Image: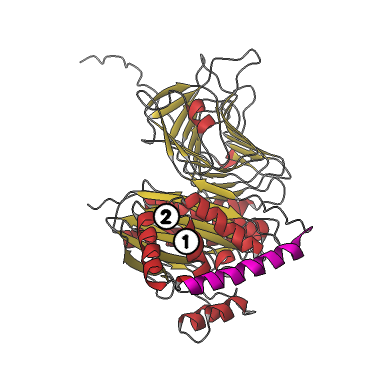
């Protein structure tokens, strides 16, 4: 197997015109998974479509079964069909969809899956090449040479697309749905994935120049690209992922040196030209004197790394690793039992290396009483996956996970024995494929103006306090949860705010009553013969 060391960075910014950001980015150099998603549908709907696509695609690609092409096709199709189902089950999300570009890098090649007008470029030896095709009328004309890049960037119909993820049901091999390509990925090459917020504002030649200038530092390149898009107008959300091979910087430097040897002007001509340019620069500086250049907007840029926690690892506690983690990093926890309260962090993923082997229990009980095992306050673009979060009489928990005004992906966790398994107070978190059981009160309690998305969770034996029985899931107005594919053990297990259709609830979710315990056989009396 060919293993190329990868260096990656990702960044996203709402731009200068829009208040919200409907884009999502993801990069995982360890697994070779890279993704840019651009939501369609406006504000909450576009953001939700992008969030569903990111989590579903990432989860399928992390499962290394099937060929790279099969994994890409299945991942995008699963995301497509789930976006469609969520939109059907909630009027607020009707019409939501997204466009996206995903890349899976392994064994010296990159398998690219693409739908819409986001893009993937390959950079190597001082050159840039667009790999994907824009699934739009203007993009087709640009790809065919009918329109120049500059004309296409200015075209009034630039943002129209005829393919998307989420507007209609698809199968993985449907023609006219997913564009899949496999290209070589050499150690001296790089890939750049972006939303159209970059390609509509910055030409491919300028992209090459900016990345080449910071070839050894993808995070710097990402930040510079986003700033360039914003300085050109910032009309849309702009998102960028750069993934470089270990020899990319050297290859770009060698190409620049070759151009220098073969293409510079003679020294006399160069002296004249540079003198003229310097004079023009001086005149421009005088004209601009006194004009304050606006400070560039804050840019979310991440250079991903993995921080390992456990016996013999770099960090002994999860909290110590979370303190050091930066947006884009992953805190990976080895098997074992951890007795601490964990605070989630914006942009940081927290996962058990082997699902189910890392156990979180209560920290030593504070004087104020039981606390939550995991908390998130105002956290965005975060994830917790693969843990067992357990309470018992000696180590009680007020909540397994407590989220306040947070957008967190909670995936594939087991949460048992807490007062509430998960308590949501505002925000738009995603709960997927969790097992929540034996809570004293509600397994999931939703409060405030929360817009959570609950998909394929299993809830059973919750509300077990005999003095005050509660449902498995309770949501209070004005919250608006979306439920899809969840499994409950009794029909009265769900309490939703007024306005939710009970028939729709059981159309999109499942009722699997738990089996009644079989009483032990009573000893019978012997029969006389």
Q: Is residue 509 above or below residue 157?
A: above
- Chief secondary structure of the magenta span? helix
Q: Is residue 14 left or right of residue 384?
A: right
How far apart marks 1 and 2 lie (CA) works out to 9 Å
Answer with the quarter of the image where residue 68 lies: bottom left
Q: Is residue 352 above or below residue 293?
A: above
Q: Is residue 472 left or right of residue 128?
A: right
Residue corresponding to mark 1: 193
Answer with the quarter of the image where residue 368 lies: top right
Tell which of 453 and 128 is nearer to you.
Answer: 128
Rendered location of residue 199, percent (x, y)? 55, 68
- Residue for point 35% across, 59% down: 251
Q: Which residues are magenta?
A: 268-290
Disc number placed over residue 120 in the picture, else none: none
Q: Which residue is most to the right?
A: 290
- Mark 2 burial class by Cα count in 10 Å: few <14, some 14-19, many 20+: many
- Residue for point 54% across, 15% down: 364
Rendered location of residue 10, percent (x, y)? 50, 52
CB contact under 8 Å: marks 1 and 2: yes
Counting residues from the N terminus, which is met first, the one under dot 1 or under dot 2? 1
Q: Which residue is most to the front?
A: 268
Tell which of 511 and 85 is nearer to you.
Answer: 85
Residue corresponding to mark 2: 243
Rendered location of residue 332, percent (x, y)? 42, 35
Report helix, strand or loop for mark 2. Answer: strand
Residue 465 included in the magenta stretch of the image: no
Report helix, strand or loop for mark 1. Answer: strand
Rendered location of residue 115, percent (x, y)? 47, 68
- Mark 1 burial class by Cα count in 10 Å: few <14, some 14-19, many 20+: many
């Amino acid at each position: 197997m060919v293993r190329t060391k990868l260096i990656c960075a990702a960044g996203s910014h709402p731009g200068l015109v829009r208040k919200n950001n409907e884009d999502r980015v993801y990069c995982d150099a360890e697994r070779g998974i890279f993704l840019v998603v651009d939501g369609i549908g406006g504000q909450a709907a576009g953001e939700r479509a992008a969030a569903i696509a990111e989590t579903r695609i990432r989860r399928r690609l992390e499962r290394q079964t099937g060929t790279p092409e099969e994994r890409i096709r299945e991942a995008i199709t699963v995301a497509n069909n789930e976006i469609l189902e969520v939109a059907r089950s909630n009027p607020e999300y009707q019409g939501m969809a997204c466009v996206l570009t995903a890349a899976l890098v392994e064994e010296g090649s990159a398998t690219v899956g693409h739908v819409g007008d986001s893009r993937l470029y390959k950079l190597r030896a001082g050159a840039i090449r667009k790999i994907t095709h824009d699934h739009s009328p203007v993009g087709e004309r640009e790809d065919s040479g009918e329109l120049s890049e500059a004309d296409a960037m200015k075209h009034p119909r630039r943002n129209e697309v005829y393919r998307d993820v989420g507007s209609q049901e698809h199968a993985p091999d449907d023609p006219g749905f997913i564009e899949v390509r496999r290209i070589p990925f050499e150690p001296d090459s790089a890939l750049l994935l972006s939303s159209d917020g970059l390609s509509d504002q910055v030409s491919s030649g300028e992209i090459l120049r900016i990345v080449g200038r910071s070839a050894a530092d993808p995070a710097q390149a990402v930040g510079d690209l986003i700033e360039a898009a914003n300085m050109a107008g910032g009309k849309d959300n702009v998102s960028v992922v750069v993934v470089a091979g270990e020899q990319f910087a050297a290859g770009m430097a060698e190409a620049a040196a070759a151009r220098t040897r073969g293409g510079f002007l003679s020294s006399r001509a160069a002296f004249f030209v540079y003198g003229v340019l310097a004079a023009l620069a001086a005149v421009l500086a005088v004209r601009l004197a006194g004009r304050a250049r606006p400070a560039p907007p804050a840019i979310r840029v991440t250079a991903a790394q993995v921080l390992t926690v456990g016996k013999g690892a770099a960090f002994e506690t999860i909290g110590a690793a979370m303190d050091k983690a930066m947006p884009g990093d992953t805190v990976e926890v080895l098997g074992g039992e951890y007795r601490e309260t964990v605070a989630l962090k914006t942009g940081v993923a927290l996962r058990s290396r082997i699902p189910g082997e890392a156990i979180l229990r209560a920290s030593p009980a504070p004087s104020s009483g039981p606390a939550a095992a995991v908390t998130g306050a105002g956290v965005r673009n975060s994830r917790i996956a693969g843990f067992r979060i357990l309470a018992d009489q000696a180590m009680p928990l007020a909540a397994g996970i407590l989220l306040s005004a947070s957008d967190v992906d909670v995936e594939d966790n087991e949460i048992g024995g807490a007062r509430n398994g998960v308590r949501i107070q505002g925000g738009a978190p995603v709960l997927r494929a969790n097992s929540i059981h034996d809570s004293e009160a509600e397994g999931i309690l939703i409060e405030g103006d929360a817009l959570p998305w609950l998909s394929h969770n299993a809830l059973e034996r919750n509300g077990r306090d005999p003095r005050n029985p509660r449902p498995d899931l309770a949501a209070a107005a004005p919250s608006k949860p979306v439920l899809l594919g969840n499994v409950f053990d009794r029909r009265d297990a769900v309490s939703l705010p007024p306005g939710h259709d009970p028939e729709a609830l059981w159309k999109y979710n499942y009722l699997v009553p738990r089996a009644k315990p079989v009483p032990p056989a009573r000893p019978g009396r012997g029969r006389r013969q």
